[in-house]
Amino acid sequence: MRYMQQVQEELIENAKEELKRADHSIYVTLKYTRTVDIIKNIIKRLISASDIAILEALHYLKAKKKIKEMPPVSKRRAELVASAIPILKKDIEFYFLLREIDIAPYTKREEYRKNVALVTTVEGKTIIVDIETVRKHFERIVEFVDKIHDMVKP
């Protein structure tokens, strides 16, 4: 049991480190560079923090004997968490949207200017990720990570 608690603490720390890096990218790096590459990097960090939080939830579910094993693929892990913990379903759907935005082809709009934005199409919808949108995404992932942490802490 002590080992599980140590694993969970490490996972929480790793997720928080990813969120710190994303926070710095949003409020410092993006503020001065205003490039789509930074927005793309922030999205990758948010996905990474979510992956770690999902892994933490799976460790918790396994310790509680609600699941037998953890899938090796992150998409299956997320689906398993969504089915085992229904209150996280909307957060997991948002995580899938971020993954889609990350892999979809994109164009740059107003790079090096105030209204820099990543423009992509996901499932036939045009999605524009500008500075304000990426901040909202960041806040939502912070809430998601905190929700999982609160749920699994002893």
Image (spheres, rainbow, N blue to C red):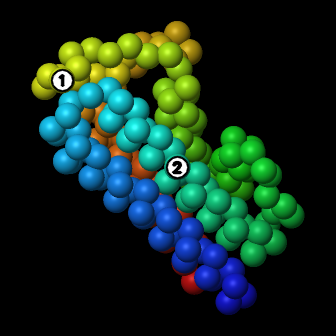
| 73 relative position to 126: left or right | right
Residue 19 position (above or below residue 154): above
- Cβ atoms under marks 2 and 1 closer than 8 Å: no
- Of the residues tagged 2 and 1, which is closer to the observer? 1
The residue that label 1 is drawn on is: 112
Work out whether residue 127 or residue 106 is closer to the camera in this orientation and state it. 106
Give me the residue at 56% from left, 15% from top.
123
The three-letter code of the residue at mark 1 reads Tyr
Give the class, few, some or many, for how many residues have Cα within 10 Å of label 2's Cα (few <14, many ≥20). some
Give the class, few, some or many, for how many residues have Cα within 10 Å of label 1's Cα (few <14, many ≥20). some
Quadrant in which residue 32 is drawn: top left
Q: In terms of sequence position, does the residue under pointer 2 or pointer 1 come before the other?
A: 2
The residue that label 2 is drawn on is: 48
Give me the residue at 50% from left, 65% from top.
14
Q: How many marks?
A: 2
The three-letter code of the residue at mark 2 reads Ser
| 144 relative position to 32: left or right | right
Residue 102 position (above or below residue 84): above
The x, y position of residue 51, in whole percent, is 58, 51
Q: Secondary structure at mark 2?
A: helix
Work out which quarter of the rendered image holds the C terminus and state it: bottom right
The residue at the far bottom in this view is 2
The x, y position of residue 20, in whole percent, is 34, 59
Give me the residue at 68% from left, 53% from top.
81
Residue 106 position (above or below residue 138): above
Q: Secondary structure at mark 1?
A: loop
The residue at the far top in this view is 124
The x, y position of residue 153, in whole percent, is 55, 78
